[in-house]
């Protein structure tokens, strides 16, 4: 018996376990994650316009969010590591407060409420944790306030002597959680359900309970009603400029039913096993093996801890190897309540995003809507486990397995965000190598960059950060636009010269023209290309989308300030300068080609080849081919032309375009002309 006692964990270790579990779930890749989606514009505003700018910036969107952004950005500088760390601490705090809240509602259901809080902590349906600056302010801080409001409502009921004080706190936190964002506008019915649990302990009969609940709830109802009136006014008559209510035809009864069933399936069940589906697509990849390892290690650690966690069972109900006998402490009524409350929580949590006509898709930006369904989803699964496995000693292992799957899902997602951040940094370093400076008023056009968690307007912020480091107000100097999404007649009217480009960027505005544009492309697994109509003409990029090909003729590399000092790249945002591998030599060769410095182009080619570097896109050989020809190294030009074609026949037309231009413009005499004719014939370039 003494040995058994020594091997058990006291209940006071639970907060420490929560913290360690938070680190395991969200912290292992934290140093290698950064800014995503709207993080970039918000960080740029905080840095260059100041935290106070968030007040007018949010006036047309969610005016009560402005003060939250003002407060947090006044305390934290725009450093990704700091914001990711704060996100981790908030997730830890939220899980503790969820546990505290449910313990106040169900004080006797110790294992059950702990299970809910653990599931809430690792909830796998929400993949946007690493969009830290945005979601800390937009969701997590208001959510924390709402959880505190629920908890203080329960505390007010259980401590009558301090009922007024706790009710006041609950109302204050309700205002703070409800008004900043509409994510939680439909959460209030959960308070009625929680009050039912509390009132049922002391009041018999259905209608007496209802009357007492209404007496307790009416102050909260007034706040909720006030928020509803505010939303109706702001949506219909005010200045709201974000999501609107979906068209009436989309809000059909059938559409509602299908949306609710979809939410129940994804939130209550599928999201918990989603990681198995994702890793099954590439079982041999390193990220899959790492994820499987995380699931296995997490399962072992969580099961070990839960099996030895001491609450208040008797020694007879504890087996030193099998752990606690849950059958002794079964609470089947709790399981039914949790399932019902969870189902309701999921349904009401889906309503705000559904009325805005927004889909609920997993592993996408749209799964952020699950933040309002997390309580419901965690309650539902915990209740289901209680009903089905309440008597079984296997329950602790099933809880540990579900938690491990949640951890695995979050680790899998974190790895995606890590890769995306690394790719962002690579792209902007390549841009800095190729574009030392840029004329103000220039728009960078591309079809789309190979990034998963950014938009063109989001990336407009780091573009300005790099090329306008002294910006202090006025029109936005630079913009980055995707032809895939912006050819809507507004921000990008058409891909013809002289078209005005104008759009608001929160409280500032960009004004430019398609006649002041530089077109780029970043092919997957390749370097950034600045497209010049001279060198990228013909059908060189024939396999690219039409809108990108149309934008090539608008590209004016003369807007690149080739003699400018290299831009400063803040390490916190862009990392240290990457090793000088192939892309460095390619970007510098492109810059030298723009200057007409063919000796430097050839020298850079020699350096890259001597170190064994080669391109991921065979079109990246083109500037070196021309450089070798124009410096008289015909044999090397022939060699890498044939190599480029043999490695990948797709650049044939680019090779043809290059050799035709060499043939027409070359000054190397008969030998150069003969080589050009040979290459044109070899690649079947035609007349």
Image (cartoon, rainbow, N blue to C red):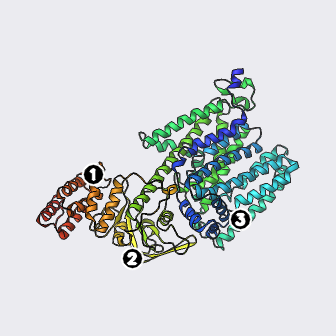
- Mark 2, other Cα within 10 Å: few <14 / some 14–19 / many ≥20: some
Residue 623 locus on image (x, y percent)? 27, 61
Q: CA distance from mark 2 to mark 3?
A: 47 Å
The number of numbered discs placed on residues in the rendered structure image is 3
* Left or right, residue 81 beside residue 445: right
Residue 330 locus on image (x, y percent)? 72, 33
Answer yes or no: do the residues labelled 2 and 3 have beta carbons within 8 Å?
A: no
- The residue to which callout 2 is attached is 515
**Residue 366 falls in image quadrant:** bottom right
- Please name whichever residue, 135 or 6, is drawn nearer the observer in this view of the structure: 6
In this rendering, the answer to whether 551 lies above or below 122 is below
In this rendering, the answer to whether 284 lies above or below 593 is above
Q: Secondary structure at mark 3?
A: helix
- The residue to which callout 3 is attached is 228
- Mark 1, other Cα within 10 Å: few <14 / some 14–19 / many ≥20: few
User: From this viewpoint, is residue 382 visible?
Assistant: no
């Amino acid at each position: 018996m003494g040995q058994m006692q020594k091997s058990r964990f006291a209940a006071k270790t639970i907060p420490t376990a929560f913290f360690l579990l938070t680190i395991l779930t969200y912290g292992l890749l934290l140093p290698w994650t950064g800014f995503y989606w709207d993080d970039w514009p918000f960080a740029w505003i905080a840095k260059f316009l100041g935290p106070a700018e968030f007040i007018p910036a949010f006036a047309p969107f969610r005016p009560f969010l402005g003060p939250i952004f003002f407060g947090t950005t006044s305390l934290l500088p725009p450093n990704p590591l700091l914001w990711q760390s704060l996100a981790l601490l908030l997730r830890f705090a939220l899980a503790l407060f969820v546990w505290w809240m449910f313990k106040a509602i169900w004080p006797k259901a110790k294992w059950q409420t702990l299970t809910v809080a653990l599931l809430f902590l690792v909830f796998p349906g929400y993949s946007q944790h690493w969009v830290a600056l945005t979601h800390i302010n937009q969701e997590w801080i208001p959510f924390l306030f709402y959880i505190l409001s629920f908890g203080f409502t329960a505390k007010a009921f259980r401590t009558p002597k301090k009922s007024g004080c706790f009710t006041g706190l609950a109302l204050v936190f309700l205002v703070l959680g409800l008004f900043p964002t509409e994510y939680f506008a439909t959460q209030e019915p959960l308070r009625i359900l929680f009050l039912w649990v509390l009132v049922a302990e002391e009041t018999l009969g259905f209608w007496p309970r209802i009357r007492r609940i209404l007496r307790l709830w009416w102050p909260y109802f007034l706040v909720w009603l006030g928020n509803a009136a505010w939303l109706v006014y702001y949506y219909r008559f005010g200045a709201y400029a974000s999501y609107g209510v979906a068209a009436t035809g989309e809000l059909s009864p059938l559409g509602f039913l299908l949306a609710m069933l979809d939410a129940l399936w994804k939130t209550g069940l599928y999201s918990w096993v989603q990681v198995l589906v994702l890793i099954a697509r590439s079982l041999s990849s390193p990220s899959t093996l790492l994820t499987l390892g995380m699931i296995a290690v997490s399962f072992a650690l969580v099961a070990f801890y839960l099996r030895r966690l001491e609450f208040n069972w008797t020694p007879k109900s504890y087996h030193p190897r099998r752990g606690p006998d849950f059958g002794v402490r079964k609470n089947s009524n709790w399981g039914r309540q949790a399932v019902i409350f969870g189902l309701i929580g999921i349904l009401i949590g889906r309503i705000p995003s559904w009325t805005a006509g927004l889909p609920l898709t997993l592993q996408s930006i749209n799964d952020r809507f699950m933040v309002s369904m997390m309580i419901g989803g965690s309650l539902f699964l915990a209740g289901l486990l209680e009903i089905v496995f309440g008597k079984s000693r296997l329950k602790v292992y099933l809880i540990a397995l579900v938690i491990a799957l949640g951890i695995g899902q979050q680790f899998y997602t974190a790895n995606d965000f890590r890769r995306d951040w690394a790719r962002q940094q690579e792209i902007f370093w390549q841009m800095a190598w190729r574009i030392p400076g840029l004329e103000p008023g220039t728009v960078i056009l591309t079809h789309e960059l190979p990034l998963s968690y950014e938009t063109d307007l989001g990336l407009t912020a780091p573009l300005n950060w790099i090329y306008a480091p002294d910006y202090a107000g006025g029109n936005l100097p630079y913009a980055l636009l995707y032809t895939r999404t912006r050819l809507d007649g507004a921000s990008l009217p058409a891909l013809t010269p002289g078209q005005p480009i104008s759009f608001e960027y929160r409280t500032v505005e960009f004004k430019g023209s398609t006649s002041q544009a530089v077109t780029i492309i970043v092919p997957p697994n390749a370097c950034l290309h600045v497209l010049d109509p001279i060198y990228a003409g013909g059908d060189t990029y024939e396999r690219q989308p039409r809108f990108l090909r149309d934008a090539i003729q608008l590209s004016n590399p003369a807007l690149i300030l080739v003699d400018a000092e290299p831009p400063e790249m803040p390490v916190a945002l862009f990392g240290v300068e990457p090793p000088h591998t192939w892309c460095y030599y390619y970007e510098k060769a492109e810059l030298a080609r723009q200057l007409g410095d063919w000796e430097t182009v050839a020298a850079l080619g020699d350096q890259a080849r001597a170190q064994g570097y080669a391109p991921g896109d065979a079109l990246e050989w083109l500037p070196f081919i021309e450089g070798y020809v124009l410096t008289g190294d015909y044999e090397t030009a022939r060699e890498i032309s044939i190599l480029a074609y043999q490695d990948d026949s797709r650049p044939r037309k680019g090779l043809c375009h290059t050799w035709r231009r060499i043939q027409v413009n070359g000054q190397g005499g008969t030998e150069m002309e003969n080589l050009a004719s040979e290459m044109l014939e070899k690649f079947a370039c035609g007349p």
